[in-house]
Amino acid sequence: EEELLPICQSISRVFARLGEKDVRSRARLKFLVAKLGIEEFRRLVLEDREGLSEDPRWTAHLDDVHEGHDGPLWQIEKQDKATASPELEEWLATNVTPQRQPGYKVVMVYLPLGDITADQIRGLADLARRFTGDAVRMTVEQNMALRWVRESDLPALHEALDELALAMPRAETLTDITACPGTDTCKLGISSSRGLARTLIEHLEERRGEMEEVVRGLRIKISGCFNSCGQHHMADIGFWGVSRKRNGYNVPHFQVVLGGQWAENAGSYGLAIVAVPGRNIPAATDRITQYYVDEREGEESFQAFVTRVGKASLRTLLQDLVEVPLYEEDRSFYSNWGDPREFTLGDMGIGECAGQVVSPVEFGLQASEREVFEAQDRLDQGDSSGAADIAYRAMLIAARSLAREKEVGLGEAPDDVVAAFKTHLFDPGLFHDPYAGGKFGNYLFRVHGENDNGFEATPATARQRIEEAQLFIEAAHSYHVRTADVVSV
Ligand code: SF4
């Protein structure tokens, strides 16, 4: 304990001295550790620690550190449960769960979008002292949990939370949507995850009266890009922000990911179905949930339902929502949720219809997405080898569609495609992702090498290859968006 702060200080000092300064995406401690090796990094930290002058503040907090209460609290006067209002009843049903220790409850303070004001958080601190003995825990659902709440204190706690506007029911239900910062504040954000979450909460709250109980229990999570900070891959219904070029413009989309498991320590990830324009996500959510209600067998879970009906039928369900109207017909498709700004058309001029302009690159990338989908279907049917081959083919189609812009006469032979991709896009660093560097391009090289060496697919390796193909194609889209001569939303 005495060494905790000085060691942290030395780690910071070593990182400040030797960490990446020029390429912001690599300005992470993990890259420095990878570069130096953990042993050398440890040596440098300990060496720096020896040179630090003693500072009493390193240990001044230790006397207080164990004073935080985490256990049963004092008796509080019993409340009369018989007077429970409908609001209290609903809150008890959705925000309160039994604790392992008999007589105590965990109370979830539902914070839409994870937001809380300064006054609310001060008030909540007071309530934590009054009802739980000082401890509040943040949750991955962006809520706050109060533990060790006596059952008899629940009405009083609800009333006190209500005064702070923190007694909103329906925590950890369909409308309690988790969203990363997205384009609001994250430089890597592609789509507005918070804007979509806000819209979806309003949309689903309006429909709550007619919603089946089984739908209310589903979870939605949203990330603004593939980095997954919103945990979209471990939700019943997940969305992650992508950009697609449609009608000559970059249009914010969300990739729909269904069937992820948020319980049991995120036991399985959902699978990508199709990218849908952001404007159509509320409609897509309605369709998916209604399909579940209509086609559910017995007590079937959403994960089991997604597996049974299969990705092909879910994609068909959403197919018409993939369409993007022309800019002149509906400009809302060309801006992010919650952000009214539209791009300027620049020298194209307002009213110029670009609807027919679909570049060969776009065709190629769309074709590669269809191949990946086919690969997933094959894998579902138990054909690992076929699935792996098709996933490889999808990567080649995407790579060729980009490389042909540089080498017009490029053929389809895999060796030629990979060589052209390497020469024109990978080696000059053009394909490199601002965040992940050459990671996605290297997927293609590895898979190409595997195929040359008699690769024999198993279900696990075929699935990995499909996921890598999806990421490679996503990187191809990003490259195309970065480099194409179009107006950006
Ligand atoms: S998922 Fe992407 S947009 Fe969201 S916080 Fe992470 S890096 Fe930023």
Image (cartoon, rainbow, N blue to C red):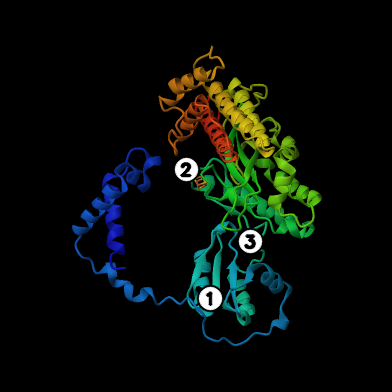
As measured in the structure, the alpha-carbon distance from the residue carrying label 3 to the one carrying label 1 is 21 Å
Q: Which residue is mark 1?
A: 127
Rendered location of residue 458, percent (x, y): 58, 37
Three-letter code, disc 2: Lys
Task: Name the foreground residue: 49 vs 277.
Answer: 49
Local SS, label 3 = loop
As measured in the structure, the alpha-carbon distance from the residue carrying label 2 to the one carrying label 3 is 28 Å
Any atom of ligand 1 within 8 Å of the CB at mark 1?
A: no
Rendered location of residue 24, percent (x, y): 38, 41
Neighbor class of circle 2 (other Cα within 10 Å; few <14, some 14-19, many 20+) is: few
Three-letter code, disc 3: Glu
Q: Find out whether the residues at labels 2 and 3 contact each other: C-beta distance under 8 Å.
A: no
Task: Name the foreground residue: 131 vs 305.
Answer: 305
Q: Earlier in the sequence, mark 2 or mark 3?
A: 3
Residue at 71% in and 73% down: 89
As measured in the structure, the alpha-carbon distance from the residue carrying label 1 to the one carrying label 2 is 36 Å
Any atom of ligand 1 within 8 Å of the CB at mark 2?
A: yes
Residue at 74% in and 58% down: 214
Q: Which residue is mark 3?
A: 172
Q: Which residue is mark 2?
A: 187
**Disc nearest the viewer among 3 and 1:** 3
Local SS, label 2 = loop
